[in-house]
Amino acid sequence: MTLNECRSQTLEITHNNIVRKVKLPELSKFSARLYQKVGGNINELYVTQWGCGHSDKINVAILYYSIGGGSAPYADSSAMYAATGVLIEDEKFEKYRNATRDGLGHLKSVRSIMPD
């Protein structure tokens, strides 16, 4: 059964010689409340896809989280980061909308630790 156990994930972002380490998942306050409201447990989310988006000289990084299957309303979530490594809170999202759309269209899978 140890194959079904996942280790915690950490994101490390370096910008202008400043390093920011974040224990994942890191959701915006609004997204975290919404996720919990529909019955989700944030600690069960793991990064399964990632992407970068660009528009109007704005760059973002996107992490897509999943609980590993299912179609429940709490099966997935996502977080967006500005180039500085700061989590984009929902009230600032409009500024990043086009870059986020670009990134969501180019998500890449995270390499699985599960055996083939």
Image (cartoon, grey):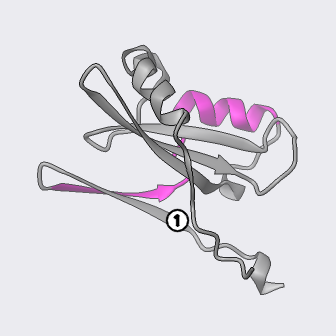
Q: Name the residue located 67 percent from the left edge and 73 percent from the top edge.
A: 6
Q: Is residue 108 left or right of residue 60?
A: right
Q: Is residue 28 visible?
A: no
Whether residue 96 appears in magenta in the rendering, the answer is no
User: Mark 1 sits on what residue?
Assistant: 9
Q: Quadrant of residue 12?
A: bottom left
Report x, y in % for residue 68. 77, 57
Question: Hey, which residue is sitting farthest left in the picture?
Answer: 17
Report x, y in % for residue 67. 75, 54
Label 1 residue SS: strand
Which quadrant: the N terminus? bottom right
Question: Hey, which residue is sitting farthest bottom in the picture?
Answer: 2
What are the residue bounds of the magenta stretch?
18-38
Q: Name the residue located 73 percent from the left edge and 38 percent from the top edge.
A: 36
Q: Is residue 48 visible?
A: yes
Question: Hey, which residue is sitting farthest right in the picture?
Answer: 71
Q: Please tell me how many numbered marks the rendered image carries.
A: 1
Q: Name the residue located 52 percent from the left edge and 40 percent from the top edge.
A: 106
Counting other residues with Cα less than 10 Å from the Cα at mark 1, is it few (<14), some (14-19), or many (20 or more)?
few
Of 89 and 80, the residue lying toward us:
80
Residue type at tag 1: Gln
Report x, y in % for residue 78. 59, 39
Q: Quadrant of residue 97?
A: top left
Above-or-below relation of 105 to 2: above
